[in-house]
Amino acid sequence: MTGTSYNPLDKSNLARSIENELLGRDPVQLSAAAGIQGAGVYVIYYVGDFPPYQQISAKNKEGMFSQPIYVGKAIPKGGRKGGISTDASKGKALADRLGQHAASVEQAANLALDDFLVRYLVVDDIWIPLGENMLIETFKPVWNRAIDGFGNKDPGRRRATQYKSPWDVLHPGRKAMEKLADSGITPEFLTARVDDYLAGRPLAKLPKAIQTQVEDEQDEAEESADEA
């Protein structure tokens, strides 16, 4: 029998090792993330009763925690500005980012902070994006793939063409996002989008202006990830 030899330093094997290490950690309440030290990757789980997410919630109850609703990363402050010497075990990048997420959930009218848990892993800065990409590809979380906007920060002064994100339409309440314009998409449209995504059906397209904004916001989030 012939075949390629196993390379432990292959990119996919390195990424899988990060994923396996993270998934071996016990989840903690998202509300308890304030004391975390360091930077790295994380997965957020939902166990509540919001109707569109019941399929997700069922996979995370009774200690299973098998389907994250969101995957993210927190890089060391200044990590995008050059060099590989940043010590990922120092600082509060994870605590700050998870704190922002906790505040978003707490302000949402139809979500409860107690229904969210998180696994996190402090990772050397050069491996953080690799680990995040692997986790997203493995789990394809609904807030990463179908309902964009959870990771958005305060947009500051509203641009004339800036609309509420899909996440903020489905989960209204974030004070920083109330200044943004309505796009015309409805909670009903987004609920159907979640249903289709979880069932593996093709997704109804977002309006072009919203899709363009989602792509721009993803780029901006990358650029500002270490400026919190």
Image (tube, rainbow, N blue to C red):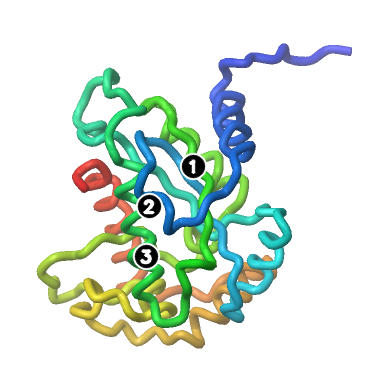
Q: Answer yes or no: do the residues labelled 2 and 1 have beta carbons within 8 Å?
A: yes
How far apart in space, not on screen, are marks 2 and 1 (Cα)?
10 Å
Which disc number belongs to residue 98? 2
Task: For label 1, count other residues whose C-alpha is less than 10 Å away and answer few (under 14), some (14-19) or many (20+).
Answer: many
Establish if 153 lies above or below 110.
above
- Image coordinates of residue 15 in percent, x first then y, are 55, 30
Q: Nearer the viewer, mark 3 or mark 2?
A: 2
Which disc number belongs to residue 120? 1
Q: Quadrant of the N terminus?
A: top right
Task: For label 2, count other residues whose C-alpha is less than 10 Å away and answer few (under 14), some (14-19) or many (20+).
Answer: many
Establish if 99 lies above or below 170.
above
Closer to the camera in the image, 120 or 56: 120
> Can residue 208 be spotted in the picture?
no
Which residue corresponds to mark 3?
149
Could you say whether the residue bearing mark 2 is in a helix, strand or loop? Answer: helix
* Residue type marked 2: Leu
Kindly give the residue lying farthest to the left in the view shown.
157
